[in-house]
Amino acid sequence: MTELDWPEILLRLGTATLAGSAIGLNRDLQGKPIGLKTLGIVGLSTAAVVLLAVEFAEPGRINDAASRVIQGILTGIGFLGAGVIVHESRGLRVSGLTSAACTFLAACLGIICGTGQWRIVGIALALAFVLLTVGRRIERWLHRALGGKEDPHRPEGSANTAHREGG
């Protein structure tokens, strides 16, 4: 059994909470249905469960039980993510996919924080913020540059349709 000290537990749980909350803040600022509190709790809860599994693992390695805990978390988090995905009855529009992906990311970051792999957390968080801040612009530019038929982020018709219809 591995015995983590209080500062290490605080570091792992605190970092997981902050990482999830940072992603959630981005979602809040974008007016999305899932935000700082929810994703902070996702990060915290997944890190807490992984820490519990790590505490019972052999020193220096994650055992089979910890692996099953991580698999269970990732399966279960899919249900939470699915709750933010909405299929609009008009047309073939689906919304909430990025928020669902952010829920999954917050869970993954919580798992990684629970195992204490700080470089992975830092790089994953940095890449996530690049995608969340400039991803849509890059996506639109590539769509136009590669000859896409219509803007994938706008409903068919006018660019103002979403505003007129309350979308």
Image (cartoon, rainbow, N blue to C red):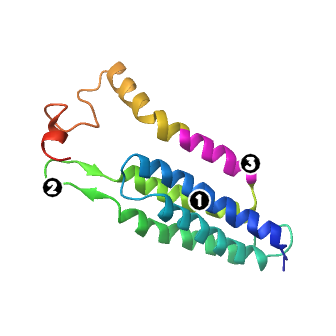
Closest to the observer, 36 or 8 = 36
Q: Is residue 1 above or below residue 140?
A: below
* Amino acid on which disc 3 is placed: Arg
Residue 131 inside the magenta-drawn segment: no
Residue at 75% in and 68% down: 10
Answer with the quarter of the image where residue 60 lies.
Answer: bottom right
Residue 166 percent location from the top left of the image: 17, 47
Instruction: From the viewer's perspective, tell me whether residue 7 is left or right of residue 32.
Output: right
Q: Is residue 128 above or below residue 68?
A: above
User: Does the image show residue 6?
Assistant: yes
Mark toward the start of the polypeptide (3 vs 2): 2
* Magenta range: 118-129
Instruction: From the viewer's perspective, tell me whether residue 131 is left or right of residue 159.
Output: right
Would you name the residue on which mark 2 appears? 89
Q: Are marks 1 and 2 in contact (CB under 8 Å)?
A: no
Residue 8 percent location from the top left of the image: 80, 66
